[in-house]
């Protein structure tokens, strides 16, 4: 634009700005971009506003003609903006109507996780024994040979150690002066508890244990729960032991189940007994049941009266106290409750399996 514009040059410039805006806005696809383009033309320092500042240099007759053109260009720009915004809104509306998903439906929240079946089993077992007055006790998984074996009447040359072959740790790794190992049962918790407190004792000890086993029903690492009750002589008997285990089995798996105690041997109990319960599949019928092999019973753990040698090892007088102990696998009890046929299923972390236990 020259320093002394004429009305003709201003009219031409304003018409060109109107055409330029129409071409520019046609390519814009969002309201913020369209509003920014509008400001570039009609803002206080916009291109149309700057052109109209030259009106003061024209004579009154020419000023009117240029002003009319300026108003027409402004109106045209505003109309183009409105039309373009309406077109964009209509396109968005059409896109919403074409959606396969109904966006007005409630959103689908993230799926919440669930407790592992073994955690569910452990918590339920702890609750059942808590109803009988048992407290939960815990201990280290890396144990000394004394707490894991010798305090439980299992000396180094005892043949029962063959049944609990485990993983021994290097003294350099464990930092211990004595022989250490991964515990083979949670019985060391019983020994530690008796060493720490005088009788009476009434505890359960759930936790991980380790043995060199690996087949469909055994794992090198599995979960076990043991119970111990110690009181004065004459206050605890095998009848109390059987009643405790019968109550647990019926509360955990069904009121129609029975248990039986079969004579057995464990170095830390005397007398000792294997604990059998009615088969949860045939409910004790036996005939034709391949899981209990037609007997109507299945083994779930071991039990017995605490051996006097165990009491002596922890400083209790076996002439004054007596008690019973029992133990079973949390894994096995979970398998029976949830009808799982391979123990490894519990450890593989397959979400397809875990989702079946809400």
Image (tube, rainbow, N blue to C red):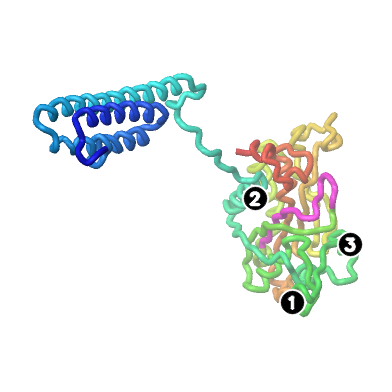
**Is label 1 or label 2 in front?**
1
Q: Residues within 10 Å of mark 3 (few under 14, many from 20)?
A: few
Callout 1: helix, strand or loop? loop
Q: Can residue 322 be seen in this view?
A: no
Name above or below for residue 272 compared with residue 215: below
Q: In which quarter of the image is residue 354?
A: top right
Q: Where does label 1 land, which residue?
A: 175
Looking at the image, tell me whether mark 3 or mark 1 is earlier in sequence order. 3
Image coordinates of residue 64 in percent, x first then y, are 12, 27
Callout 3: helix, strand or loop? helix
Q: Where does label 3 land, which residue?
A: 162
Q: Are marks 1 and 2 in contact (CB under 8 Å)?
A: no
**Span colored in magenta:** 214-229
Tell me the residue at 61%/45% (across/down). 115
Q: Are marks 2 and 3 in contact (CB under 8 Å)?
A: no
Name above or below for residue 70 compared with residue 339: above
Image coordinates of residue 75 in percent, x first then y, are 23, 25
Kindly identify which numbered label has been placed on residue 122: 2
């Amino acid at each position: 634009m020259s320093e002394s514009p004429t009305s003709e040059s201003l009219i031409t410039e304003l018409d060109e700005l109107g055409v330029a805006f129409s071409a520019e806005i046609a390519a814009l696809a969002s309201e913020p971009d369209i509003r920014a383009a509008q400001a570039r033309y009609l803002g206080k320092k916009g291109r149309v506003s700057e052109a109209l500042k030259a009106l003061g240099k024209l004579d009154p007759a020419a000023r009117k003609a240029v002003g009319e053109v300026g108003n027409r260009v402004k109106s045209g720009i505003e109309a183009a903006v409105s039309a373009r915004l309406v077109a964009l809104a209509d396109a968005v509306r059409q896109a919403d109507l074409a959606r396969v998903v109904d966006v007005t439906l409630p959103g689908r929240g993230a799926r919440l996780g669930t407790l592992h079946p073994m955690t569910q089993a452990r918590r339920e077992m702890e609750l059942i024994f808590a109803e009988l007055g048992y407290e939960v006790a815990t201990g280290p998984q890396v144990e000394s040979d004394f707490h894991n074996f010798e305090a439980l009447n299992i000396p180094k040359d005892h043949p029962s150690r063959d049944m609990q072959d485990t993983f021994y740790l290097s003294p350099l790794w464990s930092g211990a002066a004595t022989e250490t190992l991964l515990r083979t049962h949670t019985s060391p918790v019983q020994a530690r508890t008796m060493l720490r407190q005088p009788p009476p004792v009434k505890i359960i000890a759930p936790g991980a244990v380790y043995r060199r086993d690996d087949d469909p029903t055994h794992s090198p690492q599995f979960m076990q729960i043991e119970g111990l009750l110690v009181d004065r002589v004459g206050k605890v008997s095998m009848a109390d032991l059987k009643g405790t285990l019968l109550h647990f089995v019926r509360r955990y798996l069904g009121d129609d189940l029975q248990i039986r105690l079969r004579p057995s041997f464990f170095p830390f109990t005397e007398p000792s007994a294997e604990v059998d319960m009615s088969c949860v599949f045939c409910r004790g019928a036996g005939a034709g049941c391949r899981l209990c092999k037609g007997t109507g019973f299945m083994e779930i753990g071991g039990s017995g009266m605490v051996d006097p040698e165990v009491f002596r090892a922890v400083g209790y007088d076996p002439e004054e106290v007596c008690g019973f102990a029992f133990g079973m696998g949390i894994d096995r009890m979970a398998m029976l409750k949830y009808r799982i046929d391979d123990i490894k299923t519990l450890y593989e972390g397959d979400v397809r399996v875990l989702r079946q236990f809400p």
